[in-house]
Image: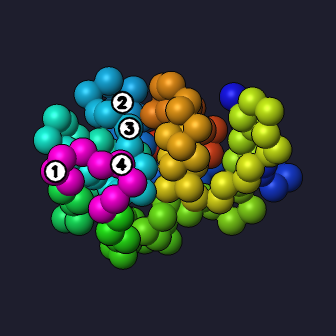
Amino acid sequence: MNYEIVKPENYQKVPFPGLNEWITALRSGKYEQGARNLKTIYSNGEEYCCLGILCELRTIPFKTTVMMPPDPGDGYIPHSIDIIDDFGSSGFLPRGVSVNLKFSNEDITRSGSLAGLNDKLVDNNIPNGFNIIADILEEIYIHTDLPK
């Protein structure tokens, strides 16, 4: 799988409070990646969207989907919280920024949100999807400290 980040000319990285903590969590190996829910609990473990990890780090309440027994085709609960101002519930990328994904033997797929990117990586069985997302976050955003 290859990807390309499309940015406007003269793009300036957008400040993101707590970016370093989020990237560290994504790369930690502590979280199993899942799709279509911020967090899904199965009888044999938990899966997270990259945005679900951000919610946990920020202690933002969010919907959790519980599925017993495991059935990845069921249990979608849309989320409607805004994780941070102007980021939206789907983790919209800054204006004019998108990520083009090319999977083997497929056309290029474009994503303008982190939720869409996360789900496409999972749906295409791409290993280390959280590491790819962390790399993309580092290209788009710049760390600032969280307000105290």
Residue 36 — which label? none
Identify residue type, mark 3: Gln
CA gap between label 2 and label 3 equals 15 Å
Of labels 2 and 3, earlier in sequence is: 2
Q: Is residue 44 left or right of residue 83?
A: left
Callout in the foreground (3, 4): 4
Q: Nearer the viewer, mark 1 or mark 3?
A: 1
Q: Are marks 3 and 4 in contact (CB under 8 Å)?
A: no
What crowding class fits label 3: few (fewer than 14 Cα within 10 Å), some (14-19), or many (20 or more)?
many
The region drawn magenta spans: 67-75
In the rendered structure, which amino acid carries the disc numbered 1? Met
Q: Nearer the viewer, mark 2 or mark 3?
A: 3
Q: CA distance from mark 3 to mark 4?
A: 12 Å
Secondary element at image label 3:
loop
Q: Main secondary structure of the magenta part?
A: loop
Quarter placement of the N terminus: top right
The residue under the point 51% across, 46% down is: 118
Q: Which residue is the site of mark 1? A: 68
Residue 99 percent location from the top left of the image: 70, 47
Q: CA distance from mark 2 to mark 1?
A: 30 Å
Residue underneath mark 4: 72
Horizontal side, residue 87 vs residue 79: left or right = right
For disc 3, the marked residue is 33
